[in-house]
Amino acid sequence: MNFFEEVKKLTKDLVAIESIVREGQGESQVAKYIFDFYGSLDYFKTHQDQVLLQKTEDDPVDRHNAISLVKGTKGKSRETVILMGHIDTVGVDDFHEIKDLAFNPEALPEALKKLAISQKVREDIDSGNYLFGRGALDMKSGVAGHMAMMKYFSEHPEELEGNLIHLAECDEEDNSHGAISALRVLEDWKDKFDLDYIAAINADYSIPNDQDGESRNIYLGTIGKLLPSFYVYGKETHVGEPFGGLDPNQIMAQLTRQINLNVALCDEDQGELAPPPMGLKQADSKIGYTVQTALAAYGYFNYFTHAMSPKEVMDRVEKVAVQAFDQVIEDINQNYKTYCQLKGLVYRPRPWKTRVYTFKDFYRQLEEKWGPDFTRAYASYTQALHEGARDLDLRLFSNQVIQWMWENWVEDKSPAIIIYFGSVYSAPIQIRGEEAGEKRLLEALDQAIIEAQKTYDKKIYTKYFYPFISDSSFMKVSDDEEGLRALEDNMPAWGSKYIHPSQAIKKINVPVINIGTVGYDGHKITERVDMDYTFRVVPDILYRTLKALVG
């Protein structure tokens, strides 16, 4: 099967619709384009209840998913495969003076050639093998491939014993409102159309194999992500008395030093190593300029996981926080001792003691002291904060909750670190081939790759973990109850602004693979997709895999 020209056209059409996450109506416009595309097909004209434009739920932004279903007529199998991919993109500020061309695959390459780009990019432009544009690689070409596949099977339902669902979801680049909202539709359709979900196939982007720069990768399962975050309270002082206080920025800097790129903190599973933690934000609470040190500082870190649960991640970073606090106290006292010697003063160690709390311990300490007065006030405050500012960033929401707790309920305000999870949980999914459904999926994929490899000269490998955050994480629950409880107990936003939808996910609970786009420079001005592989080879592998599973 050759879907090249159709996938290319659909990709260009999708890229041309500006759909920057959380900005304007673009995400809804792309969803509407996909909805209308299906609505124009004969199959959906007679099965109108099998295509849906879904508004996201509990979302401060007005945006939509597009969801469709093709039911096979070859047999009466209930088995159903979910095709999924996101329709939003990151912003285009990096395009600077050619921002107006970011979504124009035809004009963008020539504009790029006038900039200071690398020789490799120039060669790729001249080759004609790549399609440029924001979202071309990440991941509208993948969505286009799924649309072409759904169109084909809507015209040939007799080739399917089972069924196909296509989920084109918004908001993957931020808080995954799209995928989380779609869980309800998947659950409803499971009953309404008598479906049995057996697998999910994502089409998110990857880069060429890191071993040789040429080979392609297909992924079994996906990486997970947590955002361990730290709110640090110090003791203010005038800079003329520098040893009279404790600068929270110093503690935060030490945390960054001990966490950032620390390979000892990497998760490993099935012989594959996750990237090390990386800082995403570090700041203090000070507004404006004074010569008083800051009262508080905060920071958060991306933490990739392959098998570690939220509990294991919290245990690890709590140990690091204790070590960081200890080190700062030691450094302060050593510097103060030297200072006293040089000044001829009597040295006395500074009074600071290491205090580190997980959010769970911090909350329970206040609960034990204040009882229902605190718990009722906490519930009221967090709900009011959410309702009063529904578009407040999830991470800043958590910070405000901790500030409120500290300022209103904490009596001992000596320096401390409070550790919490500050963002949406993207769960890792492992595919080990031990369950019958996983084994069947892997066998279908392996055979499809063997056949596709006959007409493709670059080696196609399978790896265990898709290496970037994706909405695949919302298709299966791998964590045990203890691990998930640690997530709940350590999220200030839990119950008011966010709840990880583990119960909804369990009703889907399918193995996930990623047969996705390939190219270079995702999230960069020179983002581009390899057209031969993505428009020809990927749909071929997908078609063969689907035929083996539900054909």
Image: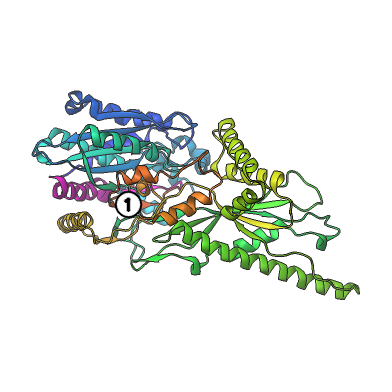
Colouring style: rainbow
In front of the other: 163 or 339: 163
Residue at 80% x, 51% y: name it. 292
View extreme (right): residue: 344
Q: Residue 529, percent across and down?
A: 34, 48
Residue at 75% x, 64% y: name it. 352
Tag 1: residue type?
A: Val
Q: Name the residue under label 1.
A: 518
Q: Residue 77, percent across and down?
A: 13, 41
- Element marked by disc 1: loop
Q: Residue 338, percent across and down?
A: 81, 74
Q: Quadrant of the C terminus?
A: top left
538 in the magenta segment: yes
In the drawing, does residue 6 fall left or right of residue 487? left
In front of the other: 14 or 127: 14
Q: In which quarter of the image is residue 350?
A: bottom right
Q: In which quarter of the image is residue 131?
A: top left
How many labels sit on residues?
1
In the drawing, does residue 101 fall left or right of residue 286? left
Callout 1: few (<14), some (14-19), or many (20+) C-alpha neighbours within 10 Å? many
- Residue 320 in view in this figure: yes
Height in image: 503 above or below 440?
Answer: above
Height in image: 91 above or below 273?
Answer: above
- Residue 6 in view in this figure: no
Q: Quadrant of the N terminus?
A: top left
Q: What is the span of residues highlighted in magenta in the rendered image?
A: 524-551
Q: Is the magenta stretch mostly helix, strand or loop?
A: helix
In the drawing, does residue 530 fall left or right of residue 331? left
515 in the magenta segment: no
Q: Residue 483, percent across and down?
A: 44, 56
